[in-house]
Image (cartoon, grey):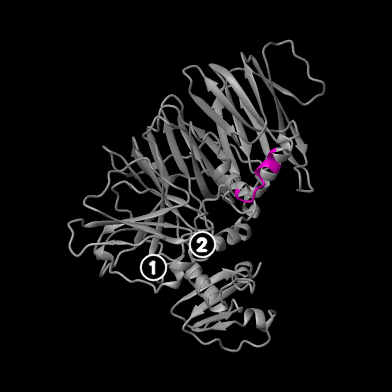
Amino acid sequence: MMHVVVRRGSVVTGHGPSKFSVDRYGISCDDVQFCANLDCREHHKEASIVHADCLKIFCRGDTPWGLGDNLRWLWVASTWRSPWRGALPLNAPPRINLDRRLDDLRLTKRMTTLPPELYAMIRDFSLSTNPMPNFALHHYNQLVAAFDLFREDVREEFLDRIESWTRGELPEVCEEGNKPFIRLSIDWQGLQSIEKMAVLPPAANLRSDCTGYVLGLAALQGVTGRFRVWDTPCPPPVDYIDGHNTSSICHLGTIWTETDSLTGITFFLAHGSLYAVHAHTHAQLSAEHTFLFFEPVRQKSLTWIYVPIQQGIAKFAFSQVKDTPGDFNKTQHILLHIDGVGDIIVGPCNKRPLKFLLIKQPRTLIYRRMDGSPIYFCDAFSREHELREVTLPNRIISDPPWQSWVYLSSAPLENVIAIRIFSVPMTKICRGVLIEYRGRVKRALGQCRLGVDPVRNYMGVNKLCFKNTRYQPMGTGRKMDGVILECHGGNDHIHQNSGWTCCDMRGFLSFWFTKDEMKIEHNDT
């Protein structure tokens, strides 16, 4: 992958021989210059990094417009990704409807004639790979369609005069107004819209993975605090300030818990740090959509921890993240207390007492989003309660079977009415177990990847049998610890080989697990 730095109003300095040809990457047109040295330390007021494929597309010679117009389009497309000068672009994925893109390319009919399994494989592979080279061409076509707009001189307006504006349209302006609040909407292309509001909107369960929102006073002169970019146009009324982070922009994500549609939360962890959360609803039963936002390299290191939620969250707590210079990891422990289920702790195994910030009856959970880095919970909002500091006692657990980034989950076996076993594809190895009890409450053990892994369903279970074994995960080249798990309705079952542990439906079942390994323990008490 290659990138070039686009600069405006600058002079390209000599960096010695370049691995790029001068006629292609040493381009200079009007006041736009290009530099292919990513280590360049020259000071420039405005600079933007673009992919080399985009540069090739915009510098094609087979267009009816000159190179100067093409480069000006590229300048607009690259630098206007920043919502304002000096701000980093919002690292949000573009809204790409693959089925619509296939239709645009007249490929839908051909694709749908394929066997369903092959079509699903092509579609999933396309969603899990970098879409930008394909989307760059689509974006270029959009810019060409808006040729007349880019030929016009750039229009400047003071922010407090803009009543409303949407990208691609002319702004509505007013000399005087009585709307003291403003909302900026930002996506991967930069500033998307501007809205003036008479009052701040009430907090509501509306969020987006592709758009960020800034809400504040319309008069932004002399702002000394940091901008908070939310994933919702209607954020909760909190005054979160990150004392550790020194950047001018604070990205905040939300999970709305005060809703009947919330059925669970999946936490994505790697090397003990949290990288993403997915709120399960009746409309989004699987967390695969969130998983596919990650680059394929990061996907290979993620552990899924699913927490079912049927009756809301009674208490929510999170440990405070230590800001250690040079330490990329941000290990955090999370506690959820669910009525009828009890305490559930998410995070790597830890025997030491931890200090938590706890809130009762939370309405909104708030986490700090770090582009390409671990995220961490930092605040929560409740209608009636406030955050308070608590210290949890030591967890009485045995030593974990492995050394680093081990997770533990456990559940009782009494009053079970149904069990779902999630397996590693094309193997008998168990990846996770979802247990349903009388009263319809549920607990998840290990990694329950809803809508992704094969599932076996059992009802009327009297015996749960497991065998700790060794297996070789696909693509690892070495054997790891795994578990084979079976459920039976009676006591007269027979196993074909030795090493099985057969449990009556009482006591506790404990899962030690990492991304690829698992061991099970059963205790009668």
| Residue 398 pos. (x, y %) | 59, 37
| Residue 20 pos. (x, y %) | 68, 79
- Mark 1, Cα crowd under 10 Å, few <14 / some 14-19 / many 20+, is few
Q: Which residue is mark 1?
A: 84
- Residue 491 falls inside the magenta stretch: no
From the image, state whether disc 1 or disc 2 is nearer to you: 2
Nearer to the camera, 84 or 481: 84
Range covered by the magenta-colored residues: 104-112
For the C terminus, the image quarter is top right
> Going by the picture, which residue comes out furthest to the front?
64
Q: Secondary structure at mark 2?
A: helix
* Residue 73 against residue 375 in the figure, above or below: below
Q: Which residue is mark 2?
A: 145
Looking at the image, residue 517 sits to the left or right of residue 326; the answer is right
Q: Is residue 327 visible in this depiction of the protein?
A: yes
- Mark 2, Cα crowd under 10 Å, few <14 / some 14-19 / many 20+, is few
> Going by the picture, which residue comes out furthest to the right?
497
Helix, strand or loop: magenta stretch:
helix
Residue type at numbered disc 1: Trp
| Residue 412 pos. (x, y %) | 54, 24
Alpha carbons under labels 1 and 2: distance apart: 25 Å
Q: Residue at x 56, y 36 (%)?
A: 286
